[in-house]
Image (spheres, helix red, strand yellow):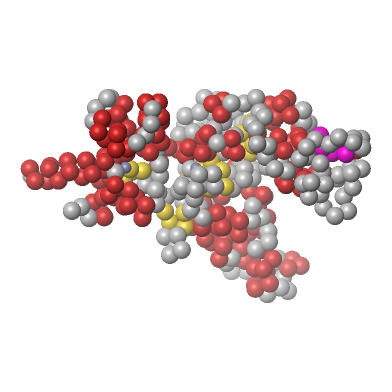
Amino acid sequence: MASDEDVFSHLSSRPDYLLGPMITVDEPANLCTLARHPGPSSLGRLDPLSLEILHEILYLLDIKSLSRLSRVSHRGRATVESLPIYRTLMKCVPDTLKALGQTRLLRFYTANQLRAVLRTKDCVICGKFGPFVFLPTAERCCYYCQLYHKRFRMISIPRAQTIHNLERRELNRLNVLNTIPGVYKTQVVKKWRRLRLVTYDAASKLAKAKVAEERARNKSSAPIPGTNITTFGAPAGATNDGLDSENLMLACCMMPWPDSDDSDLSPQNNEFGGMSSIQFPYLRPDNVLEHGHLCKGCEWVYSHYESKDLPDSVLYDLELGSEYQVSHALQEKSLRVMVKSEFLTHVAECYGAQKLLALLDTEGQRK
Ligand SMILES: [Zn+2]
Ligand SMILES: [Zn+2]
Protein backbone atom coordinates (compact mmCIF):
# COMPACT_ATOMS: atom_id res chain seq x y z
CA MET A 1 0.00 0.00 0.00
CA ALA A 2 1.60 3.27 -1.16
CA SER A 3 1.80 6.13 1.34
CA ASP A 4 0.45 9.58 0.46
CA GLU A 5 4.04 10.71 0.15
CA ASP A 6 4.76 7.94 -2.40
CA VAL A 7 1.63 8.84 -4.33
CA PHE A 8 2.68 12.47 -4.67
CA SER A 9 6.32 11.79 -5.44
CA HIS A 10 5.58 9.18 -8.13
CA LEU A 11 2.23 10.18 -9.60
CA SER A 12 1.99 13.95 -9.40
CA SER A 13 3.53 16.57 -11.62
CA ARG A 14 3.28 20.35 -11.26
CA PRO A 15 1.21 22.19 -13.87
CA ASP A 16 4.22 24.28 -14.83
CA TYR A 17 4.49 22.82 -18.31
CA LEU A 18 1.00 24.10 -19.13
CA LEU A 19 2.28 27.64 -18.81
CA GLY A 20 3.76 27.97 -22.31
CA PRO A 21 1.13 30.33 -23.75
CA MET A 22 0.64 32.21 -20.49
CA ILE A 23 2.40 34.97 -18.59
CA THR A 24 5.38 33.81 -16.56
CA VAL A 25 7.36 36.15 -14.33
CA ASP A 26 11.04 35.57 -13.62
CA GLU A 27 11.48 38.33 -11.04
CA PRO A 28 8.31 38.73 -8.93
CA ALA A 29 7.46 41.94 -7.08
CA ASN A 30 9.05 42.39 -3.69
CA LEU A 31 8.42 44.70 -0.78
CA CYS A 32 9.64 48.18 -1.62
CA THR A 33 13.38 48.32 -2.14
CA LEU A 34 13.90 51.86 -0.79
CA ALA A 35 16.75 51.83 1.71
CA ARG A 36 15.57 52.25 5.29
CA HIS A 37 16.92 55.19 7.27
CA PRO A 38 16.25 56.28 10.83
CA GLY A 39 15.43 59.97 10.13
CA PRO A 40 11.96 61.58 10.30
CA SER A 41 9.52 60.76 7.55
CA SER A 42 6.15 62.17 6.61
CA LEU A 43 2.90 61.33 4.87
CA GLY A 44 2.04 65.02 4.56
CA ARG A 45 -1.59 65.80 5.40
CA LEU A 46 -2.17 62.19 6.44
CA ASP A 47 0.33 62.46 9.30
CA PRO A 48 -2.23 63.23 12.05
CA LEU A 49 -4.18 60.03 11.29
CA SER A 50 -3.67 56.95 13.43
CA LEU A 51 -2.43 53.70 11.87
CA GLU A 52 -5.90 52.15 12.31
CA ILE A 53 -7.57 54.98 10.38
CA LEU A 54 -4.85 54.85 7.70
CA HIS A 55 -5.43 51.11 7.28
CA GLU A 56 -9.18 51.70 6.87
CA ILE A 57 -8.39 54.13 4.06
CA LEU A 58 -5.78 51.92 2.42
CA TYR A 59 -8.25 49.02 2.24
CA LEU A 60 -10.27 51.11 -0.19
CA LEU A 61 -7.38 51.97 -2.51
CA ASP A 62 -6.43 50.09 -5.66
CA ILE A 63 -3.10 48.29 -5.63
CA LYS A 64 -1.43 50.82 -7.91
CA SER A 65 -2.24 53.61 -5.45
CA LEU A 66 -0.87 51.48 -2.61
CA SER A 67 2.31 50.94 -4.57
CA ARG A 68 2.65 54.68 -5.21
CA LEU A 69 2.05 55.53 -1.56
CA SER A 70 4.77 53.09 -0.55
CA ARG A 71 7.21 55.11 -2.64
CA VAL A 72 6.25 58.53 -1.30
CA SER A 73 8.28 58.30 1.89
CA HIS A 74 9.62 55.86 4.41
CA ARG A 75 6.54 56.29 6.55
CA GLY A 76 4.42 55.65 3.47
CA ARG A 77 6.30 52.43 2.84
CA ALA A 78 6.05 51.33 6.47
CA THR A 79 2.30 52.06 6.50
CA VAL A 80 1.59 50.09 3.32
CA GLU A 81 3.85 47.22 4.33
CA SER A 82 2.11 46.97 7.70
CA LEU A 83 -1.23 46.35 5.96
CA PRO A 84 -1.89 42.61 6.53
CA ILE A 85 -3.74 42.13 3.25
CA TYR A 86 -0.85 43.68 1.30
CA ARG A 87 1.66 41.41 3.01
CA THR A 88 -0.50 38.38 2.17
CA LEU A 89 -0.50 39.26 -1.53
CA MET A 90 3.23 39.98 -1.59
CA LYS A 91 3.89 36.62 0.05
CA CYS A 92 1.46 34.49 -1.98
CA VAL A 93 1.24 36.07 -5.45
CA PRO A 94 4.16 38.45 -6.02
CA ASP A 95 4.34 37.29 -9.65
CA THR A 96 0.69 38.23 -10.24
CA LEU A 97 1.28 41.70 -8.80
CA LYS A 98 4.25 42.14 -11.10
CA ALA A 99 2.22 40.91 -14.09
CA LEU A 100 -0.68 43.24 -13.26
CA GLY A 101 1.80 46.10 -13.21
CA GLN A 102 3.41 45.13 -16.49
CA THR A 103 0.06 44.62 -18.23
CA ARG A 104 -1.14 47.95 -16.77
CA LEU A 105 -4.11 46.44 -14.96
CA LEU A 106 -2.95 47.12 -11.41
CA ARG A 107 -5.22 50.13 -10.98
CA PHE A 108 -8.37 48.09 -11.57
CA TYR A 109 -8.13 45.97 -8.41
CA THR A 110 -7.98 46.50 -4.69
CA ALA A 111 -5.90 44.20 -2.50
CA ASN A 112 -9.16 42.99 -0.98
CA GLN A 113 -10.49 41.87 -4.37
CA LEU A 114 -7.35 39.90 -5.19
CA ARG A 115 -7.29 38.24 -1.80
CA ALA A 116 -10.90 37.17 -2.29
CA VAL A 117 -9.89 35.42 -5.53
CA LEU A 118 -6.93 33.84 -3.74
CA ARG A 119 -9.38 32.28 -1.28
CA THR A 120 -11.57 30.80 -4.01
CA LYS A 121 -10.68 27.45 -5.53
CA ASP A 122 -12.80 26.79 -8.59
CA CYS A 123 -12.87 27.89 -12.21
CA VAL A 124 -15.74 30.38 -12.66
CA ILE A 125 -16.91 28.52 -15.78
CA CYS A 126 -16.70 24.77 -15.11
CA GLY A 127 -16.48 24.65 -11.31
CA LYS A 128 -13.37 22.43 -11.27
CA PHE A 129 -10.12 23.55 -9.66
CA GLY A 130 -8.76 26.61 -11.46
CA PRO A 131 -5.00 27.05 -11.04
CA PHE A 132 -4.90 30.27 -13.11
CA VAL A 133 -6.32 33.78 -13.01
CA PHE A 134 -7.53 35.72 -16.04
CA LEU A 135 -6.05 39.17 -15.46
CA PRO A 136 -8.54 41.45 -17.35
CA THR A 137 -11.36 40.35 -15.01
CA ALA A 138 -9.41 38.72 -12.14
CA GLU A 139 -11.45 35.54 -12.50
CA ARG A 140 -10.10 32.15 -11.55
CA CYS A 141 -10.04 29.66 -14.41
CA CYS A 142 -8.82 26.23 -15.45
CA TYR A 143 -6.53 25.42 -18.36
CA TYR A 144 -9.25 24.41 -20.79
CA CYS A 145 -11.69 27.23 -20.03
CA GLN A 146 -9.09 29.98 -20.24
CA LEU A 147 -8.07 28.69 -23.66
CA TYR A 148 -11.43 27.74 -25.15
CA HIS A 149 -14.30 29.51 -23.40
CA LYS A 150 -15.58 32.66 -25.11
CA ARG A 151 -15.64 34.55 -21.81
CA PHE A 152 -11.83 34.59 -21.89
CA ARG A 153 -11.44 35.44 -25.57
CA MET A 154 -9.31 38.50 -26.27
CA ILE A 155 -9.09 40.68 -29.36
CA SER A 156 -6.79 43.51 -30.29
CA ILE A 157 -7.99 47.11 -30.10
CA PRO A 158 -7.87 47.61 -33.92
CA ARG A 159 -9.87 44.41 -34.46
CA ALA A 160 -12.44 45.46 -31.85
CA GLN A 161 -12.74 48.82 -33.62
CA THR A 162 -13.48 47.07 -36.91
CA ILE A 163 -15.82 44.38 -35.64
CA HIS A 164 -17.83 46.52 -33.26
CA ASN A 165 -17.64 49.91 -34.94
CA LEU A 166 -16.12 51.44 -31.84
CA GLU A 167 -13.59 54.22 -31.50
CA ARG A 168 -10.26 53.75 -29.79
CA ARG A 169 -11.10 56.23 -27.05
CA GLU A 170 -14.25 54.26 -26.27
CA LEU A 171 -12.34 50.97 -26.04
CA ASN A 172 -9.77 52.64 -23.79
CA ARG A 173 -12.45 52.82 -21.10
CA LEU A 174 -12.33 49.02 -20.80
CA ASN A 175 -9.73 46.99 -18.90
CA VAL A 176 -7.09 47.09 -21.64
CA LEU A 177 -4.34 44.49 -21.20
CA ASN A 178 -0.89 45.31 -22.57
CA THR A 179 0.90 42.09 -23.48
CA ILE A 180 4.40 41.69 -22.06
CA PRO A 181 7.08 41.22 -24.72
CA GLY A 182 9.33 38.24 -24.15
CA VAL A 183 7.33 36.25 -21.59
CA TYR A 184 5.26 34.00 -23.84
CA LYS A 185 7.05 30.79 -24.68
CA THR A 186 4.73 29.21 -27.25
CA GLN A 187 2.92 32.09 -28.89
CA VAL A 188 3.16 32.75 -32.59
CA VAL A 189 2.89 36.46 -31.79
CA LYS A 190 6.34 37.98 -32.17
CA LYS A 191 7.99 38.25 -28.80
CA TRP A 192 8.94 41.89 -29.14
CA ARG A 193 5.49 43.14 -30.07
CA ARG A 194 3.47 44.88 -27.39
CA LEU A 195 -0.23 44.40 -28.10
CA ARG A 196 -3.21 46.07 -26.49
CA LEU A 197 -6.04 43.62 -25.96
CA VAL A 198 -9.57 43.73 -24.59
CA THR A 199 -12.01 40.91 -23.95
CA TYR A 200 -14.37 40.19 -26.81
CA ASP A 201 -17.16 40.08 -24.24
CA ALA A 202 -16.54 43.61 -22.91
CA ALA A 203 -16.11 45.11 -26.39
CA SER A 204 -19.35 43.49 -27.54
CA LYS A 205 -21.28 44.81 -24.55
CA LEU A 206 -19.82 48.26 -25.06
CA ALA A 207 -20.92 48.25 -28.72
CA LYS A 208 -24.46 47.20 -27.80
CA ALA A 209 -24.70 49.84 -25.09
CA LYS A 210 -23.48 52.44 -27.56
CA VAL A 211 -26.18 51.45 -30.06
CA ALA A 212 -28.75 51.54 -27.29
CA GLU A 213 -27.57 54.98 -26.25
CA GLU A 214 -27.72 56.29 -29.81
CA ARG A 215 -31.21 54.90 -30.26
CA ALA A 216 -32.30 56.41 -26.99
CA ARG A 217 -30.84 59.73 -28.02
CA ASN A 218 -32.71 59.61 -31.30
CA LYS A 219 -35.83 58.70 -29.38
CA SER A 220 -36.29 55.58 -31.41
CA SER A 221 -39.61 53.90 -30.75
CA ALA A 222 -38.17 50.45 -31.37
CA PRO A 223 -35.27 49.72 -29.02
CA ILE A 224 -33.18 46.62 -29.54
CA PRO A 225 -34.72 43.82 -27.41
CA GLY A 226 -32.84 43.46 -24.15
CA THR A 227 -30.74 46.56 -24.71
CA ASN A 228 -33.15 49.30 -23.74
CA ILE A 229 -31.26 51.33 -21.20
CA THR A 230 -34.17 51.15 -18.80
CA THR A 231 -33.89 47.36 -18.72
CA PHE A 232 -30.24 47.13 -17.81
CA GLY A 233 -30.31 49.35 -14.81
CA ALA A 234 -29.42 52.87 -15.74
CA PRO A 235 -28.93 54.72 -12.48
CA ALA A 236 -31.65 56.92 -11.06
CA GLY A 237 -31.59 60.28 -12.74
CA ALA A 238 -30.26 59.05 -16.08
CA THR A 239 -32.55 59.91 -18.92
CA ASN A 240 -33.05 58.53 -22.38
CA ASP A 241 -31.76 61.80 -23.78
CA GLY A 242 -28.22 60.56 -23.35
CA LEU A 243 -26.04 58.75 -20.85
CA ASP A 244 -22.84 60.27 -19.66
CA SER A 245 -19.76 58.08 -19.97
CA GLU A 246 -19.98 56.80 -16.41
CA ASN A 247 -23.56 55.68 -16.84
CA LEU A 248 -22.73 54.18 -20.21
CA MET A 249 -20.04 52.03 -18.60
CA LEU A 250 -22.42 50.96 -15.85
CA ALA A 251 -24.95 50.04 -18.50
CA CYS A 252 -22.29 47.95 -20.30
CA CYS A 253 -21.43 46.03 -17.17
CA MET A 254 -25.02 45.18 -16.41
CA MET A 255 -26.05 44.11 -19.89
CA PRO A 256 -26.53 40.34 -20.16
CA TRP A 257 -24.39 38.38 -22.62
CA PRO A 258 -26.59 37.33 -25.58
CA ASP A 259 -27.48 33.66 -25.83
CA SER A 260 -26.15 33.30 -29.34
CA ASP A 261 -22.46 33.68 -30.13
CA ASP A 262 -22.85 36.70 -32.39
CA SER A 263 -19.15 37.09 -33.11
CA ASP A 264 -17.34 36.30 -36.31
CA LEU A 265 -14.52 34.81 -34.27
CA SER A 266 -14.74 31.07 -33.86
CA PRO A 267 -13.47 29.50 -30.63
CA GLN A 268 -10.67 27.94 -32.66
CA ASN A 269 -9.58 31.37 -33.82
CA ASN A 270 -8.50 32.49 -30.38
CA GLU A 271 -5.11 33.77 -31.42
CA PHE A 272 -4.34 35.34 -28.04
CA GLY A 273 -5.48 32.37 -25.95
CA GLY A 274 -3.56 32.14 -22.69
CA MET A 275 -1.78 35.47 -23.06
CA SER A 276 -3.91 37.14 -20.40
CA SER A 277 -3.61 34.45 -17.72
CA ILE A 278 -1.06 33.59 -15.06
CA GLN A 279 -0.65 30.77 -12.57
CA PHE A 280 -2.51 31.66 -9.38
CA PRO A 281 -2.41 29.47 -6.27
CA TYR A 282 -5.33 28.72 -3.98
CA LEU A 283 -4.97 29.87 -0.36
CA ARG A 284 -6.71 27.25 1.79
CA PRO A 285 -8.57 28.12 5.01
CA ASP A 286 -5.56 26.73 6.94
CA ASN A 287 -3.38 29.23 4.98
CA VAL A 288 -1.55 26.57 2.97
CA LEU A 289 -0.97 27.50 -0.67
CA GLU A 290 -1.93 24.97 -3.33
CA HIS A 291 -0.71 25.17 -6.92
CA GLY A 292 -2.33 21.87 -7.87
CA HIS A 293 -1.26 18.49 -9.21
CA LEU A 294 -1.49 16.80 -12.58
CA CYS A 295 -1.93 13.01 -12.63
CA LYS A 296 0.85 11.04 -14.33
CA GLY A 297 -1.56 8.09 -14.47
CA CYS A 298 -3.94 10.08 -16.68
CA GLU A 299 -1.00 11.13 -18.87
CA TRP A 300 -0.06 7.44 -19.13
CA VAL A 301 -3.61 6.48 -20.21
CA TYR A 302 -3.73 9.23 -22.85
CA SER A 303 -0.35 8.38 -24.34
CA HIS A 304 -1.19 4.64 -24.44
CA TYR A 305 -4.51 5.42 -26.12
CA GLU A 306 -2.78 7.55 -28.75
CA SER A 307 -0.30 4.74 -29.45
CA LYS A 308 -3.25 2.29 -29.64
CA ASP A 309 -1.87 0.39 -26.69
CA LEU A 310 -4.79 0.63 -24.28
CA PRO A 311 -7.07 -2.39 -23.73
CA ASP A 312 -10.63 -1.95 -25.03
CA SER A 313 -11.96 -3.05 -21.66
CA VAL A 314 -10.36 0.00 -20.04
CA LEU A 315 -11.98 2.34 -22.56
CA TYR A 316 -15.30 0.59 -22.06
CA ASP A 317 -15.07 1.18 -18.30
CA LEU A 318 -14.27 4.84 -18.83
CA GLU A 319 -17.50 5.34 -20.88
CA LEU A 320 -16.09 8.15 -22.98
CA GLY A 321 -18.25 8.00 -26.14
CA SER A 322 -17.15 8.14 -29.79
CA GLU A 323 -13.54 7.85 -30.94
CA TYR A 324 -13.09 11.62 -31.34
CA GLN A 325 -14.56 12.24 -27.91
CA VAL A 326 -12.35 9.53 -26.38
CA SER A 327 -9.17 11.24 -27.53
CA HIS A 328 -10.46 14.66 -26.46
CA ALA A 329 -11.75 13.41 -23.11
CA LEU A 330 -8.53 11.56 -22.29
CA GLN A 331 -6.44 14.58 -23.18
CA GLU A 332 -8.62 16.81 -21.04
CA LYS A 333 -8.26 14.39 -18.11
CA SER A 334 -4.48 14.39 -18.54
CA LEU A 335 -4.49 18.20 -18.30
CA ARG A 336 -6.84 18.42 -15.31
CA VAL A 337 -5.17 20.01 -12.29
CA MET A 338 -6.36 18.94 -8.84
CA VAL A 339 -5.83 20.12 -5.28
CA LYS A 340 -4.19 17.69 -2.87
CA SER A 341 -7.36 16.15 -1.41
CA GLU A 342 -8.97 15.71 -4.84
CA PHE A 343 -5.78 14.17 -6.16
CA LEU A 344 -5.65 11.46 -3.51
CA THR A 345 -9.29 10.53 -4.16
CA HIS A 346 -8.69 10.53 -7.89
CA VAL A 347 -5.60 8.31 -7.73
CA ALA A 348 -7.58 5.60 -5.94
CA GLU A 349 -9.93 5.42 -8.96
CA CYS A 350 -7.53 6.19 -11.82
CA TYR A 351 -6.64 3.20 -14.01
CA GLY A 352 -3.33 4.72 -15.11
CA ALA A 353 -2.31 5.70 -11.59
CA GLN A 354 -3.03 2.22 -10.24
CA LYS A 355 -1.08 0.73 -13.16
CA LEU A 356 1.93 2.91 -12.38
CA LEU A 357 1.75 2.06 -8.67
CA ALA A 358 1.64 -1.66 -9.52
CA LEU A 359 4.72 -1.25 -11.76
CA LEU A 360 6.44 0.51 -8.90
CA ASP A 361 5.61 -2.36 -6.55
CA THR A 362 6.98 -4.90 -9.01
CA GLU A 363 10.24 -2.98 -9.41
CA GLY A 364 10.55 -2.67 -5.61
CA GLN A 365 10.20 -6.42 -5.18
CA ARG A 366 12.87 -7.13 -7.81
CA LYS A 367 15.42 -4.99 -5.95
ZN1 LIG B 1 -12.90 25.57 -16.24
ZN1 LIG C 1 -5.32 9.95 -13.16
Q: Is residue 243 left or right of residue 283?
A: right
Q: Is residue 197 left or right of residue 247?
A: left
Q: Is residue 197 among the parts visible in the rendering? A: no
- Where residue 106 sits in the image (x, y, percent)? 63, 48
Quadrant showing the C terminus: top left
Q: Is residue 354 left or right of residue 135?
A: left
Q: How many marks?
A: 0
Quarter of the image holding residue 50? bottom right
Position of residue 142 relative to residue 94, above or below, is above
Q: Identify which residue is drawn at 45% across, 48% down.
A: 129
View extreme (left): residue:
366
Quarter of the image holding residue 193? top right
- Where residue 165 sits in the image (x, y, percent)? 77, 28
Q: Nearer the viewer, residue 317 or 53?
A: 317
Q: Is residue 328 among the parts visible in the rendering? A: yes
- Where residue 287 sits in the image (x, y, percent)? 44, 63
- Where residue 28 sits in the image (x, y, percent)? 50, 48
Q: Main secondary structure of the magenta part?
A: helix
- The residue stretch that appears in magenta: 211-216
Q: Identify which residue is drawn at 50% across, 44% down.
A: 126
Q: Is residue 254 left or right of residue 299?
A: right
Q: Nearer the viewer, residue 268 or 367?
A: 268
Quarter of the image holding residue 258? top right
Q: Identify which residue is drawn at 82% across, 47% down.
A: 230
Q: Identify which residue is drawn at 47% across, 29% down.
A: 186
In the image, residue 47 lies in the stretch drawn in magenta: no
